[in-house]
Image: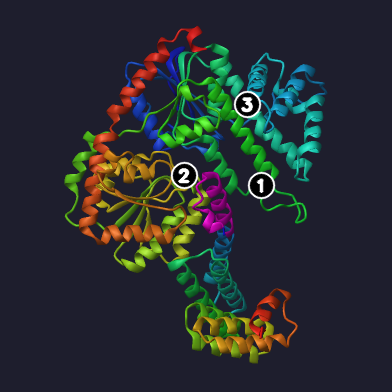
Amino acid sequence: MSHPTSASADIALLLEGTFPYVSGGVSSWVNQIIRAYPEYRFALVFLGSRRTDYQGFRYELPANVVHFEEHFLHDDLHTKESPRSRRGDEAAFARIERMHEMFAPGADSKIAMREFRTVARDMMPDGKLTLEDFLHSEHAWELICDRYQRFCTDPSFIDFFWTVRIMHSPLWKLARIAEGLIEVKALHTISTGYAGFLGALLRQSRDIPLILSEHGIYTKERKIELFKSEWIRDNRNVFQRDPTELSYFRQMWIHFFEWLGRFCYDAADPIVALYEQNRLRQIADGARIERTRNVPNGIDLKRLAPLRGQRPDDVPPVLCLIGRVVPIKDIKTFIRAMRRVVNQLPEAVGWIAGPEDEDPAYAEECRNLVGSLGLEKHVHFMGFQKIDTLMPRIGLTILSSISEALPLVILEGYAAGVPTVSTDVGSCRQLIEGLDPEDRALGQAGAVVNIADPQALADAAIALLRDKARWRAASQAGIARVERYYTDNLMFDHYRDIYRTALQARPTEAC
Amino acid sequence: MLRDVLTDPTEDIRLLAYGMLDNKEKRINQAIDEELKKFGMADRQTQAGQAAARRLSDLYWELVYQELAQGDLRDHALDRSRHYCEIALEGTPDDAALNLRLGQLLSASGQAEPATTAYYKALALGLPSTRVLPYLAELRFNQGKFADARRLMNELEAWDSLPRLQPVIAFWNAK
């Protein structure tokens, strides 16, 4: 497939594992933002894990995307030249050692950040710290051995050695991407993590402004993956293991992403959160308070409001989870809840409307669970569905996620007159019950339940589906709330200001 | 305890508890999926079919025993465990351990009398009292028959039972 290329653009969007390859809330948002500003020329930099993990674009690139490039961080991590004996740069490795000492809890994080900035500069092509030295030099070996002996609580040196390598190698690739990127006037990263690291490198090396918009909190989402992942080895035996202590490798990954996040917060201004709780979390994770602000998501009312007229008179006994079939959505809790819903309302069905290709193993587990709970006739996997055809046919939108930010599907449901039952994550309580007294006075647009509690989720859904008056009141509350607080026009106004300010910034101001 | 932590105000803690619970449950469910496939492929009277049924009964019971399934899901797991336990009993009606399992399942579903019968059958088939009587005592306790529970615990005193049970036996035997 040929992609647009250009020698320059206004804004570079740094996209890690999202638009245009993956569909979902963040991707829809990116699509919305690009299309809202036809006056700006966008360059897209997509960062993925491995090329084989992505099949084709899920979105058509808008006409104002003048440049697209993609990079896969875990492909081709080896160096171009064959390994040979090398000592490595003494000063550069001494700095790495100092930086890691300063990363320890309680050390001065300002000094650590200063060291981090210098190390990042050294990692750029032509810098003193090359990938070849990291992979093959004596200094690197000595540093790894030393840190293993001093800190590693897991007995396996081999696992430690490879964890260090796999974790850090993509950073050199990002440095090369930073070096090669076309000329742009401003940078906009949609997460911290690797994309945020790239943004901060570019901010530092080119002296152009970096905008950070975080939907979820990247560091937090990585933690969830890491807590759940079984591929991280834990070689401690029964005597070495303290059940309250995470495996050392898990901790290493968590600290790694925490520091990538801090590096990005240090470089970005403004730092945008979707809602208050996340803004506070950013501050707790190292963002400077005066740089942070909230800009909630908004949806296109004009498109969705007419769907209300297409609804049947009776509430369809259809519970619909709209979202990717991935562990963070905790689809299994929804499936389990359906066991009780069907016990109580035999005519009810559960729809799972979302792509299953992102984590095929998890999708398989979900299908098996449907089988082992005997729900084959009541729970259907629909694949990706258009909101417009889905909304008039369902009774409730369901979110069983263990983590969310400000999910668009709740707002889209409201606009189409569909209330929601959601877990108490991210901004969901705020969306369902309202934030300030004026908002709360609009009423409850559904129900909020604890995470991983299928029984409570089922009971809340049953209560709404069985009581028509209650359902109607929730539907009205949702409509009123989305119309007043969550339209796309409000959001576009905020970002118009943000982009204008960034593009007008002179180099000295950007610092 | 992990389940209580799911509502902890700190998100990291909630997520850690969720991850731990999820991993436990995932392991059991994966094993269930594998055994279901084996069971589906084998004739239920064959050795392979019987072995799969027995494993399935164990695994569904594990979901209940480890409190990984609650409410309707617990009922479902109990129902499945019993279904496969009965299939296994068709092949080996005089298997003492299977009769004990049947007793536990019936007891957990509130069917006291059939549970009692199954427990006594397990005893008659040679299971030591220390493995059966605590469950029988629990059943009597849940029925509100405290004198019977005490009598059963007294019987246990005569046995060298598991050290873990000793404090319970001592409590019930206190004069």
Q: What type is the residue that disc 1 sits on? A: Leu
Dot 1 and dot 3 residues touching (CB under 8 Å): no
Do marks 3 and 2 share a subunit? Answer: yes
Residue B44: x and y in percent read: 54, 78
Residue A58: x and y in percent read: 40, 35
Chain ID, mark 1: A
Residue B35 marker: none
Image check: A330 left or right of A63? right
Q: Name the residue under label 1.
A: A246
CA distance separating discs 2 and 1: 20 Å
Q: What type is the residue that disc 3 sits on? A: Leu
Q: Is the magenta stretch mostly helix, strand or loop?
A: helix
Chain ID, mark 3: A
Question: Relative to A77, is B120 above or below?
Answer: below
Query: First in sequence: mark 2 or mark 1?
Result: 1
Whether residue A339 can be seen here = yes
Residue A108: x and y in percent read: 66, 25
Which residues fall within the magenta stretch? B2-24
Question: Relative to A92, is A508 above or below?
Answer: above
CA distance separating discs 3 and 2: 27 Å
